[in-house]
Image (cartoon, helix red, strand yellow):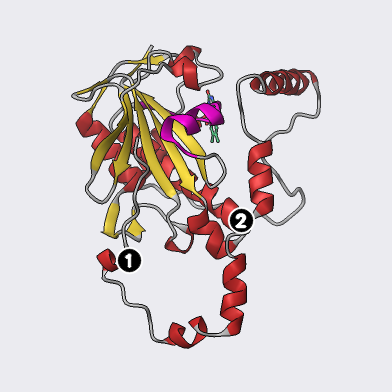
Amino acid sequence: MAPPIRMKNEDLNEKQPDEYEEFVNSKEFLNLRENLDLSPLAEQYHIASQYTIGTEFKMAFRIRVYDSYQLSSQEHLVPAFVYPGTPKIQLPVFKNHLKISKLLRKRRSPKQEIYGSVTLKQINHMLFAAHGITENIFLRTYPSPGATHPTEIYLVVWNVSDLNPGIYHHNLIENSLELICSKKTEPKDILATHDLWDNAACLFVFSLELPRTTKKYGERGYRFALLESGHSSQNLMLAATELEIQACELGNYYDNILCEMIEADGIDHIIGTTVIVAGKKK
Ligand SMILES: Cc1cc2nc3c(=O)[nH]c(=O)nc-3n(C[C@H](O)[C@H](O)[C@H](O)COP(=O)(O)O)c2cc1C
């Protein structure tokens, strides 16, 4: 596969504001410019938190210990704070029939096996929610740190009508799918635990080209990039809910295998998150 190419600034017809011209020629600018590429802590953290085949067993064990402790202990980590003895203001009932409220109530991650195909039209609707341009390349359906937009979306396709299995990249400018690899894969090649997903339709992979954001925000840009992929994936899951498609965010992917599939180096171009979908629930 040939590496991706980047749009040029000229193609966007953006003119640099005059106020920057003087600064660009200053000594401070040149000193700072050299440091824009540095975000070593983010890199170290990312590498230390990856799943690769073999390391996921440690995590599986940890999760078992945690679950057993939670069940057996009186000190459950109940995920809600309360402040006893403080004055309380009961919030009024607010009844609305907005579509978004209905979708939010309805969204649920499947806890049973999912199976069955989805259509290309449904994929298009989900991609619009997750990655759609609404005004221009910088203004889309989800918020982005400083409009740096680190997220790219790839699809690992297993069972989509009108689309051959393979790995595709979403070209959001043309709103097309670019076939980058036609090699056959199975969910178990990518996911550490896969029983519920063996017959899924496809996996959306939200990758992040970190320097787009870390050049601007340094180490903090790493957090920002992850947040962006969360916004984008939540939009996708709400669109799936609207279409009555089963969708589940998955963190149990092997980083190195997915990176290899999309030819990401795992350092500057990483996996942010994934969402698996299928038409039906067993
Ligand atoms: C970052 C993240 C990673 C997740 N990874 C997995 C996963 O690997 N496997 C899984 O079955 N569910 C996964 N989930 C889904 C959660 O289990 C699910 O959101 C949670 O049980 C609450 O259920 P709900 O989504 O229906 O509200 C993940 C969710 C998030 C936000």
**Measured from the top left, where is residue 161 in percent x and y?**
21, 22
Q: Nearer the viewer, mark 2 or mark 1?
A: 1
Q: Is residue 162 magenta?
A: no
Query: At numbered mark 2, what does the secondary structure look like: helix, strand or loop?
Result: loop
For the point 22% across and 48% down, the residue is 174
Q: Quadrant of residue 59?
A: top right
Gap between marks 2 and 1 measured at Cα: 52 Å
**For the residue carrying disc 2, how many other residues have a C-alpha within 10 Å: few (<14), some (14-19), or many (20+)?**
few
Specify the quadrant that holds the N terminus: top left
Q: Quadrant of residue 86?
A: bottom right
Query: At numbered mark 1, what does the secondary structure look like: helix, strand or loop?
Result: helix
Specify the quadrant that holds the C terminus: top left
* Magenta part of the chain: 246-264
- Side (left or right) of 13 relative to 66: left
Closer to the chain start, of discs 2 and 1, is 1
Q: Which residue is mark 2?
A: 89
**Measured from the top left, where is residue 49 in percent x and y?**
66, 36
* Residue 249 in view in this figure: no
Q: Which residue is mark 1?
A: 9
For the point 39% across and 18% down, the residue is 185
Q: Is residue 247 magenta?
A: yes
- Side (left or right) of 22 relative to 165: right
**Measured from the top left, where is residue 239 in percent x and y?**
32, 38
**For the residue carrying disc 1, how many other residues have a C-alpha within 10 Å: few (<14), some (14-19), or many (20+)?**
few
Closer to the camera in the image, 257 or 59: 257
Q: What amino acid type is highlighted by mark number 2?
A: Ile
Q: Is residue 70 above or below residue 131?
A: above
Q: Is residue 113 above or below residue 152?
A: above
For the point 65% across and 19% down, the residue is 54
